[in-house]
Image (spheres, grey):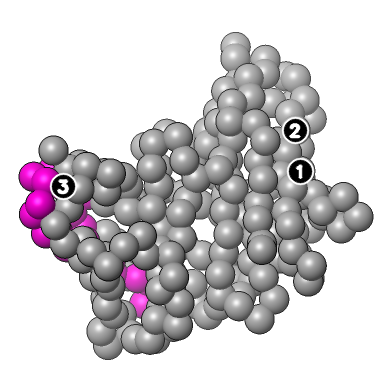
Amino acid sequence: AQRVTQPEKLLSVFKGAPVELKCNYSYSGSPELFWYVQYSRQRLQLLLRHISRESIKGFTADLNKGETSFHLKKPFAQEEDSAMYYCALSTSGTYKYIFGTGTRLKVLA
Amino acid sequence: GAGVSQSPSNKVTEKGKDVELRCDPISGHTALYWYRQSLGQGLEFLIYFQGNSAPDKSGLPSDRFSAERTGGSVSTLTIQRTQQEDSAVYLCASSLNPFGNTIYFGEGSWLTVV
């Protein structure tokens, strides 16, 4: 069965420190992977998708099919990055988006 | 519309009562999703609509839950005989079409069953 695992419920880092939010997926086909973010009192919104291979707000994520991972990284965390981050998997030929349980990132001053 | 719109934003109901949650997707989006977000949990998939059809209702937690979509637009999620464990944020999302497209979320309907 398809699954997305985010092992960390909470990640606290100091401002300026590097950040890595882990995401592993389970899917035998060709995945489409996303990171969604929810800032305080805002709706869940797309941060980035692997197919775009872009950097948004300094965040990047690389799909590693060998390790079935799609970790989210940022070299220097900012306080405004504090939010809930969800990794999501969309599977070939279906509509279904499968979300992980989310990681709350807290960036400390 | 400018974004996915959900109503009510907050609902407190007594155990055993029925509730209806409404979702108005982005105009032109054929795919519509309902998710549930419980405290400390991830996003639990409930149901998906393509047009007015729901190919997959397998995520609905029990037969007390139902959903419909009319005119390829507005969707209603109905919970009958609510229970305390139904308390959660119910999120609606839409996308232009399925697979690989960005899904856009509403702000959610926060349901509290007392």
Which residue does the numbered mark 2 point to in the structure image? A20
Which residue does the numbered mark 1 point to in the structure image? A71
> Which image quadrant is residue A40 in?
top left
Q: Nearer the viewer, residue A97 or B82?
A: B82
Q: What is the residue that sits farthest to the front in this orientation?
A: B63
Q: Residue, x 63% and y 24% (percent of image)?
A: A11
Q: Residues within 10 Å of mark 2 (few under 14, many from 20)?
A: some
Q: How far apart, in angstroms, are the residues tagged by discs 1 and 2?
A: 7 Å
Q: What is the residue that sits farthest to the top in this orientation?
A: A109
Which residue does the numbered mark 3 point to in the structure image? B11
Circle 1/circle 2 CB separation < 8 Å: yes
Q: Earlier in the sequence, mark 1 or mark 2?
A: 2
> Which image quadrant is residue A58 in?
top right
Per the image, label 2 sits on a secondary structure element best described as strand
Residue B97 vs B79, above or below: the answer is: below
Residue B17 vs B59, above or below: the answer is: above
Image position, residue B40 (x, y; %): 45, 35
Q: Is disc 2 on the same chain as disc 1?
A: yes
| Residue B18 in sight in this render | yes
Q: Is disc 3 on the same chain as disc 2?
A: no
Q: Which residues are magenta?
A: B7-29
Output the chain of dot 1. A
Q: Nearer the viewer, residue A103 or A37?
A: A103
Image position, residue B101 (x, y; %): 59, 71
Circle 2/circle 3 CB separation < 8 Å: no
Quarter occupied by the C terminus of chain A: top right
Output the chain of dot 3. B
Q: Nearer the viewer, mark 2 or mark 3?
A: 3
Q: Residues within 10 Å of mark 3 (few under 14, many from 20)?
A: some
Q: How far apart, in angstroms, are the residues tagged by discs 1 and 3?
A: 36 Å
Amino acid, disc 3: Lys
